[in-house]
Amino acid sequence: MKKTIEQDRFIVSVKVGPKGQITIPAPARQMFSIKEGDTLMVMGDKKRGIALLKDDLFYQLMGGVMPDGGDPNDKPDEKL
């Protein structure tokens, strides 16, 4: 079920499949320019929930926080 709130926001429900996968709805992929093969960062906080962020934006944001400047070539191990 999708509900449009504004042109730059939306709410949509997705189901988790048997392998723990979800499908990112087309409006979200279009809004955030997410294409096949892109890498997303999955962040979680027990109180605040789960967030997805494109890795390039994540490293750009972390550049001001991480001592090494958040080098995007120094990505964490994806098998953690």
Image (cartoon, rainbow, N blue to C red):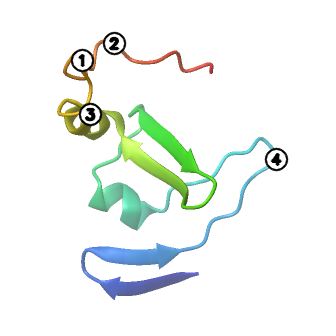
Identify residue for label 4. 18
Tag 2: amino acid: Asp
> How far is disc 1 from disc 4 in space, using C-alphas?
34 Å
Q: Nearer the viewer, residue 22 or 69?
A: 69
Q: Residue at the location (52% across, 15% down)? A: 77
Q: Residues at badges 2 and 1 in contact (C-beta under 8 Å)?
A: yes
Tag 4: amino acid: Pro
> How far is disc 2 from disc 3 in space, using C-alphas?
12 Å
Q: Position of residue 12 (x, y in %)?
A: 52, 74
Q: Residues within 10 Å of mark 1 (few under 14, many from 20)?
A: few
* Vertical relation: 56 (above or below) 48: above
Q: Position of residue 29 (x, y in %)?
A: 37, 55
Q: Earlier in the sequence, mark 4 or mark 3?
A: 4
> How far is disc 3 from disc 1 in space, using C-alphas?
9 Å
> How far is disc 2 from disc 1 in space, using C-alphas?
5 Å
Q: Nearer the viewer, mark 4 or mark 3?
A: 3
Q: Earlier in the sequence, mark 2 or mark 3?
A: 3
Tag 1: amino acid: Asp
> In the rendering, which numbered label is found on residue 74?
2
Identify residue for label 1. 71
- What is the secondary structure assignment of the residue under circle 1? loop
- What is the secondary structure assignment of the residue under circle 2? loop
Q: Residue at the location (29% across, 61% down)? A: 31
Q: Residues at badges 2 and 3 in contact (C-beta under 8 Å)?
A: no
> How far is disc 4 from disc 3 in space, using C-alphas?
33 Å
> In the rendering, which numbered label is found on residue 2?
none
> In the rendering, which numbered label is found on residue 62?
3
Q: Earlier in the sequence, mark 1 or mark 4?
A: 4
Q: Earlier in the sequence, mark 3 or mark 1?
A: 3
